Amino acid sequence: MFRNHLRLAWRGLLKRKGYSALNIVGLAIGITCCLLIFHYVAYEKSYDRFQPNAGRIVRVRLDSYQQGKLAWQSATSYPAIGPAMKKEFPEVEQFGRLIDANLLISNPDKNVKFNETKGYYADPSMLGMLDVQLIKGNPATALDAPDKILLSESMARKYFGNEDPLGKRLKTQGNGSLGTCEVTGVFREFPANSHLILHHLVSYSTIDKNNRAHGDSTSPSETAWGWYDFYVYLQLKPGASWKALEAKLPAFSDRHMNSGEWQKKNNVRSELYLIPLPDIHLYSNYNQEAEVNGNGKAVGFLFLIAFLIIAIAWINYTNLATARSLERAKEVGLRKVLGAIRGDLILQFLTESLLLNTLALALAVVAAILLAHPFDTLIGSNAGAFSLPADYALGFLGIFLLGSFLSGLYPAFVLSGYHPITVLKGLFKNTTRGQLLRKSLIIGQFTVSVILIIGTILVYQQVQYMRRQQLGVNINQTLVVEGAGSIQQDSVYKTVYQPFKTNLLQQSGIQSVTASSNVMGQEIYWTTGVSRVGTTDKAAVTLYLLGIDYDFLPAYGLKLAAGRNFSSQFPTDEKAVLINQTALDQLGFKNTAEALNNKVRIGRDTLHIVGVVADYHHQGLQKAINPMLILRIPDIRSYYSIKFTTSQPHQTIAAIKKTWDRYFPQDPFNYFFLDESFNEQYKADTRFGEVFGLFATLAILIACFGLLGLSAYTVLQRTKEIGIRKVLGATEQSLVILLSREFANLVLVSLVIAIPLAWWVMYTWLQDYAYRITIQWWVFALGGFLALLIALLTVGIQAARAALTNPINSLRSE
């Protein structure tokens, strides 16, 4: 029986090629969108799930409150937390810590040197917790003593070629330390779908060894409750609940972090939270994240869009199938007269739906395979070739079968329910109830489409606003060179840096050279508690520190709201600081005049304020301006900002490199253009806007297919009416208006529904930005106008064809 239904369905599709093609293309577009989004979402949700114990590993997060207000939230925390929690909570099986190991690594034998930034000092336990798979070396001893280093496969080849690196030594320089590390292992390349990028791991005990070399007899990397640059991971025992453990952390925090005299006097409170390892990539976007994480809201939104678009495609099938009801009414009547029962007819029409959907699915799978790479490029994903994990594939298959069934069910019941006598007498009229349902579906389609159109406009506006907003700092024509780390002694460094700077300034096209601890676009990790001196309220606040030289402010065009810049003409500037206007408010100064020459305390140092820098955007406009304390550090060397005026940057770069190699032969020449680096912060928002626009276009395109079907259905019903009106003198223009008016009303109803929904969705989205646009009324007017125009053009084609038809053809049978 099913084979017979399938044969009849295939014949029907071939008989009505135009109708079949329209349905298949519309469905294929919707299913392709759904498959690509499933592919992307599956990859984003796969992060860190390759870890064997991913379900039992959590990372500790630190929140700091000052004067009862949330000051900052950090993905890092204190190193003493891990040992303390292991001791106090039986559900903690083991802990592990990581801290950045940004090092200048060199192999003198191979004359190879690179600044390596994707590595960490790591507890030995992290090898098992992160499933670091050693190709060479013994995991039990690989990180059990100071000055041991593990390399990834690619990094081992970079420094040793095809040689066996085990037992060989590499020179390491960084954070004021100089030494060598023994290569004790090589690990497989860490998967790309990890919240960490790992190229090297250095033994954790190396940190304290370096501290002791600098005269520090303590072990801060083990005992510190104030140094919060450590990623702390906990592996829980089987069956332990991380939520239950998190509920115990407020009391733990009070015991270890909130009970000190300093915390009470300054009204400072720290709170700890846990986040499961698989959730870090999508749901952790705090200070000092190891990498730029994904956006769980955006992924969830795309997942919703996938369902909406495929639903729109199935609605189109329903409308298009119903639009053929008059054509197929006589077929149904004849079948019933010849003995067909309603159940057989329903099964026949459902078979047609399944066949048509299956053909669309086959076409969509091919399209998804071909479009996976361009889609990944557009959305900024590394998902690779099209694939779906088993659970996603089964989920999609279930959705596909259910959607195919439901989209064919309504037309099947409508078509199979016609009374043969009524149909064969030509008295068939459709029910008002059926018309209402089809119109409601069109309204739903265009509601979604209008929301996406308005959303696209607002996303574009927000991105352009951030790009065009005045930053308060000049980042153009700026080449940034990563600082020299090979010279450890400050006195020696000064004798090299000053001639290097003088030489550069003598070159044509070089306008200025300045050194700093950070440059614009980078998150500042260096913070400290700062309090005013001589006030009754001695509460400290957290300020972000920026180290600069004398030339930093004029080089970047930073303006002073009051006071002056650092100057060598003032010997007392050794104890001077600058603050920005946001820090002015944080410290409780009423105005700039009150702040000037007032004093602040940092630890044991007392410094006087000589100037207030006008606020500028150190990072993108997604983030608020941080309160900053600016220090002059004579030997600062993290970054050199070189302003140039030449229109031939490649020649300038070559000249700078030549000078660099002369003065810093032991350091690699790594550089970037500051404006390009700064704008990288907007890449995710730009891509989100492009994806938003793409799906808005596809949604309204698919919706137009449905509108085309409904307009064709209406024209078919009113063929004789149109003929009579033309005979009675109606013009083509009046007929087009008559036929289009109904559909224009449907779109207007969708606008009434869509506009408040679009406002609410986009207003909520904009709250994530510290600096954002104001939603203007004309955006909704433009979105509505575009949707209405597209709808009228779609309907107008059908209406014009009907209005131009010779009335004799439609009235011949009367």
Image (tube, rainbow, N blue to C red):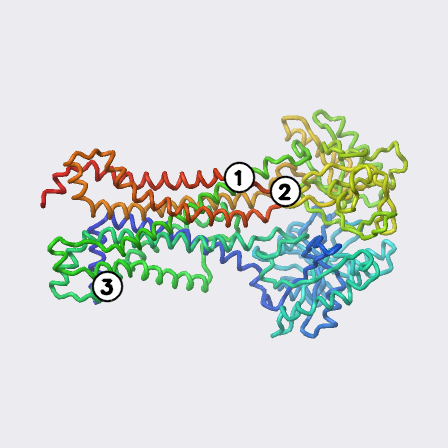
Is 104 positioned to the left or the right of 199 in the image? Answer: right
Q: Image quadrant of residue 639?
A: top right
Type of residue at label 1?
Answer: Gln
The location of residue 179, given as percent across then percent down, is: 79, 52
Q: Quadrant of the N terminus?
A: bottom left
Instruction: Name the element at disc 2.
Output: loop
Where does label 1 land, which residue?
461
Q: Which sits earlier in the primary sequence, circle 2 or circle 3?
A: 3
Is 20 positioned to the left or the right of 655 in the image? Answer: left
Instruction: Name the element at disc 3.
Output: helix
Look at the picture and state if 221 lies above or below 566.
below
Q: Which sits earlier in the primary sequence, circle 1 or circle 2?
A: 1
User: How packed is label 1: few (under 14 Cα within 10 Å), some, or many (20 or more)?
Assistant: some
Where does label 3 land, which residue?
346
Where does label 2 land, which residue?
620
Type of residue at label 3?
Answer: Ile
Look at the picture and state if 37 lies above or below 490.
below
Q: Which sits earlier in the primary sequence, circle 3 or circle 1?
A: 3
The location of residue 312, given as percent across then percent down, is: 37, 52
Type of residue at label 2?
Answer: Gly
Q: Which residue is at a point 23% across and 63% down the rendered structure image?
A: 346
